[in-house]
Image (cartoon, rainbow, N blue to C red):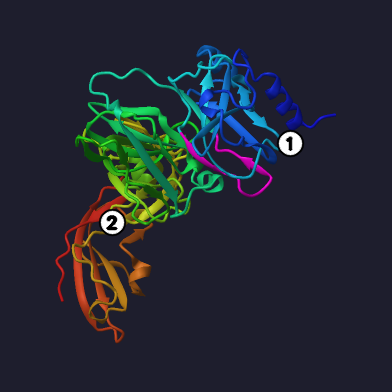
Amino acid sequence: MPSRREDGVRQGMMLAAWTIAVPMIVTLSACATGESPLGEDVSLGITWTNFERHRMELWCGRYSIDELQLVVAIDGHEHRLDELRFPCADGRYDSRPYGVLKHGVYRAWWEAHEDRLIGSHRTDITTGGRFELDITEGVHRDLPRLFLGVEAEPVAGDPRGDDLSIEGSWTIEGMAPTSEACARYGIESVQLRLWGDDAVDLPSLRLPCERGGFDTRPEAVLRLGTHSFAWRFLDERGDPVATGERVEADLGAPGLTHFVVEPMDIDDAPDFDPLGDVASIGTSWRVNGGGASVYSCEHAGIDRVRTILYHRRDTARTNGVEIGEAPCGVGMFHSGPVPVLAEGTYAVSLVALTASGRPLQTRNVRDPLVVGGSGHYPAPPVWFDLEPIEGVVVELGWPTHPDCSTGGVETISWWLDSAAGGELMSAVGGTCEEVGNELLFESLGVGDYRLTVSGHSSDLSMRWVGSCPFAYDGREHIIHCSSWPMEP
């Protein structure tokens, strides 16, 4: 039995006449010379999908695509091998255990064909441009996933044209991206967004993350003029994981034919910044099993709720950016009519705070917040679950609370007097950290009171003292003392 290669060569010889309808090894007159890359050294694994996320058989039928051709070029000679022509509807191909190419370095690109006839190449179907195929070593190679798209016709103000080719690249943590690194960041594809009069996402400029870059040469895809560019790193749903800054470039110089976009690197750098001018954000919360109200919040000791955003991969929530706060009783936060966020995908946390700013509880929003464009983005609600306060919390809202190390202060003492006269209770010996900014009185009657707090050095000499009057009506669970005339 002849080998697969011998069989292919024999068929190619039998079909060498110019009248053939199904060429096998070399199909175009431009490729009639040059050594064929066909060989048995390296097997190939290939998968393909479409940006619309339809099943391939449906998508291929909708756009009348019969087959996909992987074109391989050596020294400028283009080879369209029958072994590298695949039914569009299949979605995948793996030649193992058979090799299909010789070892070598090739230029390669994809073509979408309506049928098997020469010249049926569909130019409106985007296939990711040309790329280098280095198979100098090994016996198998999985190619980057192919994304198929449909290029719409340009409209007025569109940056597309036939004057300039464009080139761009990206890295992950300073290195060429691999499928493992892309998966670690949840990035499936990378889109270079263009702006003319409006934003345009060309399917031809959206590539698999592991490709690491693109170069449209020799094809020109832009018109001369002033355009803006921004990188968008997308997950499997097409939602942004991260975005680059929008950069404007003057590409109107006569004779300019090629443009290289500034590359971008993705890492977990500490300069995470979700702030921008694209979108607003809304968060909401419930308290102890019910809706948030003035009563439920006071009963739980919550004064206000803070909204914090984190990088989606910051699972430890160590590097957050505060977006804003709202009174607990209103049950929601809205960043307002002015956009405050950039495009991206963020982890969201809400922190329940006392009036003095002490965190009581942090709740993480279940799903990431995906900001994909202008508009308002509400996050799912969270539930705070706190033990109700039994008694009265007096928050020490002094304007200049001395630090424990200031003036040699080591301990804090306090005493509570009734306005009618007489000391009710007192304590001495607690450290700054132990006392904090709150004091709990578990049994306190209705009335007017004065709370006095003092700081002492190690020999118990007083370093400073301050007092605050307050009234308790029997209903409030949190009282904020803010009148503190401090004395040295």
Q: Is residue 420 among the parts visible in the rendering?
A: no
Please say if 220 is above or below 363: above
Quadrant (top left/top right/bottom left/bottom right) for the N terminus: top right
Magenta stretch contains residue 260 = no
Q: At which x and y percent is residue 412?
A: 30, 73
Q: At which x and y percent is residue 458?
A: 31, 84
Q: At which x and y percent is residue 265?
A: 39, 50
- CA–CA distance between discs 1 and 2? 71 Å
Among the two numbered marks 1 and 2 on one chain, the one whose residue lies closer to the N terminus: 1
SS at circle 1: loop
Please say if 414 is above or below 379: below
- The residue that disc 2 covers is 356
Residue at 28% x, 52% y: name it. 355
Foreground pick, 199 / 5: 5
Please say if 122 is above or below 248: above
User: Magenta part of the protein: which range?
Assistant: 130-145
Q: Amino acid at mark 1?
A: Tyr
The image shows a total of numbered marks equal to: 2
- For label 2, count other residues whose C-alpha is less than 10 Å away and answer few (under 14), some (14-19) or many (20+): some
- For label 1, count other residues whose C-alpha is less than 10 Å away and answer few (under 14), some (14-19) or many (20+): some
- The residue that disc 1 covers is 98
Residue at 56% x, 14% y: name it. 117
Looking at the image, residue 318 sits to the left or right of residue 475; the answer is right
Residue at far bottom of view: 459
Q: Amino acid at mark 2?
A: Ser
Magenta stretch contains residue 137 = yes
Residue at far right of view: 1
Q: At which x and y percent is residue 356?
A: 28, 56
SS at circle 2: loop
Foreground pick, 153 / 224: 224
